[in-house]
Amino acid sequence: MIMQSLLSLCLSAVWAQNSPLDSGAKGNLPVTIEADISVVCDDHKGQCVATGNAEAVRGTFKVNADTLVLHFVKTDGSHDVTSLSAHGHVVMSTPSETAYGDDAHYDMAQDRLKMTGNNLKLVTDKQTLTARDSLEYWRPQQKGIAYGDAVAVFPEKQQLLKADTLEAYFASVPGAEDKDKQELDHIEAIDNVFVSSPEEVITGDRGTYHAKAEFAEIFDNVTLTKGENQIEGAYATFNVKTSVGQLYGSRPGAKNGKRIHGLIIPKDAKKARGSTLVKKKDK
């Protein structure tokens, strides 16, 4: 994944042919840094700056930006990277995904990557994730966070998951040769949750999307809308495979439920309403 690849890049960063940095990470893969204008490394400032269509490549992972900055400290004659920053038209890519933003920063101490700026976006073969404020990845918690009008779109199913905040949790892939390889386990949607398919819309206060089962749960102040029909309850499920939503008066295990109520418009009423509108228009 892009976030994990950046962490590996920082742990084994190398520039030029005589690198002062430790490259003891997995595979000892070097990082090549190129730029149209300049690549300047300064021990006194503790940084290496690549300017002008800068590019850093490690294996199949690539970072492009107007400017790339590696920050480091000298310890016992070695250079330890403390952070990496990318500024202006940032694009991070692997063979399976690409992330876009204006700025990116990786902090070694917190093991955290944060992308900010306009048009934040992460694109994979099966989904597109966008956010207004920031995209973050916390490696210790194996968690990615999209802040501000966060939207996950699943083009194949014509489905969408939206909330103020989306927290994605990852898990190691069982049996994978690459022990660092991870896959999406579940997504927590927090505040103003909106789930839609071509036929239904479900809203609520929070929700959980289970990736492997392709199944979503929506909790508290839930409304299910299908066409002109609308039903309110306390808990809903949504099967991503079948695009079928179900509404309940209480969440699983709850003793006290909420009475389900809503408005169901019969087909005959819809037809009558349509013919009335036509007559009024004719007049």
Image (spheres, rainbow, N blue to C red):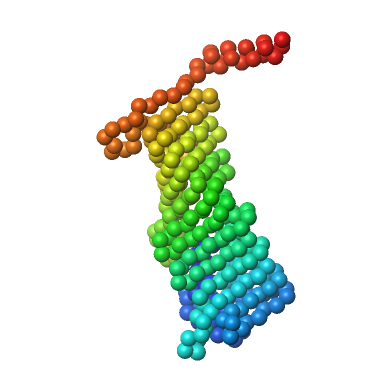
| Picture quarter with the C terminus | top right
- Is residue 233 or residue 128 the one in the foreground? 233
Give x and y (percent) for residue 113.
51, 64
Give x and y (percent) for residue 279.
67, 10
Give x and y (percent) for residue 99.
59, 58
As displayed, is residue 129 above or below residue 113? above
In the visual, does 48 lie left or right of 225?
right
Which picture quadrant has residue 138?
bottom left
Q: Can residue 146 be seen in this view?
A: yes
Q: Which residue lies furthest to the left in this view?
A: 255
In the visual, does 206 lie left or right of 119?
left
As displayed, is residue 224 above or below residue 217? above
Q: Residue furthest bottom?
A: 77
- Is residue 112 or residue 12 the one in the foreground? 112
Give x and y (percent) for residue 31.
58, 75
Q: Tell me what residue is drawn at x 46 percent, y 31 percent.
A: 224
Q: Tell me what residue is drawn at x 55 percent, y 56 percent.
A: 134
As displayed, is residue 16 above or below residue 8? below
- Is residue 259 or residue 36 the one in the foreground? 259
In the visual, does 228 lie left or right of 102?
left
Which picture quadrant has residue 250?
top left
- Label count reads 0
Q: Tell me what residue is drawn at x 43 percent, y 60 percent.
A: 142
Q: Tell me what residue is drawn at x 45 percent, y 68 percent.
A: 110
Q: Is residue 127 visible?
A: no
